Image: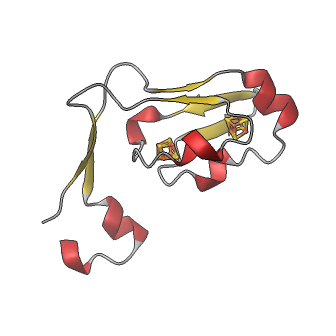
Amino acid sequence: MAKDAKTIEEKQYLVRYKADSKSHLTVLDFDICATKCPDKICTVFCPGEVYKWEKEGRMFVGYEGCHECGSCRIGCPHQNIKWEYPKGGHGIIFRLA
Ligand code: SF4
Ligand code: SF4
């Protein structure tokens, strides 16, 4: 199964998460998201669909599903995301077989 995984859904099946109780991702200023970032590009490029813009004008950060790819660390046009690795022993677990 692992080496034959082709679709995103099949590849997603190969990862597991051990979530910390505290987020390793922080959006620093929600006002910047609301007023200076019309495209909310983090909601598009994040492979884990971690960032979701809510109609109340807040960013929901589902850190538990983070793939630790680091894209949001450099992809936010306003450097508005503080990115750290999850605490030791937590985060994504890749199953290779
Ligand atoms: S890309 Fe950065 S500024 Fe834009 S919505 Fe996401 S966190 Fe906010
Ligand atoms: S590190 Fe990658 S998967 Fe995790 S929140 Fe940032 S863009 Fe999404």
Q: Position of residue 24 (x, y in %)?
A: 43, 26
| Residue drawn at (64%, 54%) of the image | 44
Q: Position of residue 39 (x, y in %)?
A: 79, 48
| Residue drawn at (32%, 69%) of the image | 10
Q: Position of residue 27 (x, y in %)?
A: 62, 26
- Relative to 61, say whether 22 is above or below: above
Quadrant of the picture in which ligand 1 is shown = top right
| Residue drawn at (38%, 66%) of the image | 9
Q: Position of residue 21 (x, y in %)?
A: 34, 20
- Relative to 72, say whether 21 is above or below: above
On the picture, is 91 further left or further right than 72?
A: left
The quadrant of the rendering that contains the N terminus is bottom left
Residue 65 position by quadrant: top left
On the picture, is 74 further left or further right than 58?
A: left
Residue 34 position by quadrant: top right
| Residue drawn at (12%, 66%) of the image | 97
Q: What's the image's color scheme?
A: secondary structure
Q: Nearer the viewer, residue 28 or 54?
A: 28
- Relative to 57, say whether 3 is above or below: below
On the picture, is 68 further left or further right than 27?
A: left
Q: Nearer the viewer, residue 40 or 58?
A: 40
Q: Hey, which residue is sitting farthest left in the picture?
A: 97
